[in-house]
Image (tube, grey):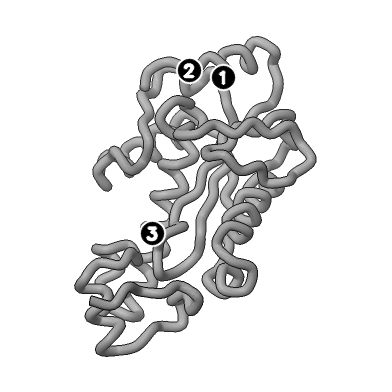
């Protein structure tokens, strides 16, 4: 997308400190949920952004570099696989998003959240279904969160190469499921996630 969404344009005119928020890793069998809070700024007006799932890995890397070069302001938040097992994936996702907001240097006025769930920050929260496809700030957050989580999974894959996490990113491919049956779960696997048996 090239243009800001209507709501982003309105918030920029009001000069409210607004951040777009997205997460990655909810459906994965391995590792953390990673969230990013990305500050809406006119700087990104001329950067074309799309939902991270629509971009190749190389394109994501180039977009992250472009955002960094333009001095974009963002923060990350994580919920570990242990936290996911303890409080469930929905609550862990909200926790990661809240941590991302808390990690920002400045306290935002408004949050644009991908999806339909408020996260309970006490700030003004606007939920936008498929926000990563319509809001540039949410799309930027999704790209940075995906880039970060992929990096984490590659690091885990170096320790446990037989799951091929650098390739499947922790999702339940047949190859991954076969490796789980053969080797059992790693310490980074989510114990409360069930795999469908063939």
Q: Position of residue 167 (x, y in %)?
A: 24, 63
- Secondary element under disc 2, as helix, strand or loop, is loop
Tell me how far mark 2 sits from mark 1, CA to CA.
6 Å
Quadrant occupied by the N terminus: top left
> Which numbered mark, 1 or 3, is in the foreground of this view?
1
Disc 2 target residue = 4
Which quadrant would residue 156 be assigned to in this image?
Answer: bottom left
User: For this view, does 16 lie left or right of residue 9?
Assistant: right
Disc 1 target residue = 8
Q: Which mark is residue 151?
A: 3
Could you tell which of marks 2 and 3 lies nearer the N-terminus? Answer: 2
Relative to 83, residue 42 above or below: above
Q: Which mark is residue 34?
A: none
Quadrant occupied by the C terminus: bottom left
Residue at 46% from the left image edge and 57% from the top image edge: 26
Residue at 66% from the left image edge and 42% from the top image edge: 118
In this view, which residue lies farthest toward the right? 122
Disc 2 vs disc 1: Cβ atoms closer than 8 Å? yes
């Amino acid at each position: 997308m090239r243009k800001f969404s209507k709501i982003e344009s309105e918030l920029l005119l009001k000069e409210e400190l607004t951040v777009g928020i997205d997460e990655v890793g909810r459906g994965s069998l391995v590792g953390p949920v990673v969230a990013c809070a990305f500050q809406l700024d006119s700087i990104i007006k001329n950067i074309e952004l799309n939902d991270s799932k629509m971009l190749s890995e190389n394109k994501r890397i180039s977009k992250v570099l472009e955002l960094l070069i333009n001095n974009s302001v963002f923060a990350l938040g994580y919920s570990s696989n242990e936290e996911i097992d303890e409080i469930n994936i929905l609550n862990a996702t909200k926790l990661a998003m809240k941590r991302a907001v808390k990690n920002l240097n400045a306290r935002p006025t408004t949050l644009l959240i991908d999806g339909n769930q408020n996260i309970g920050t006490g700030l003004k929260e606007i939920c936008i279904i498929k926000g990563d496809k319509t809001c540039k700030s949410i799309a930027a957050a999704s790209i940075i969160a995906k880039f970060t989580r992929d990096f984490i999974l590659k690091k885990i894959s170096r320790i446990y190469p037989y799951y091929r996490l650098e390739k499947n990113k922790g999702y339940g491919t047949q190859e991954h499921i076969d490796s789980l049956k053969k080797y059992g779960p790693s310490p980074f696997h989510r114990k409360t996630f069930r795999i469908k048996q063939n």
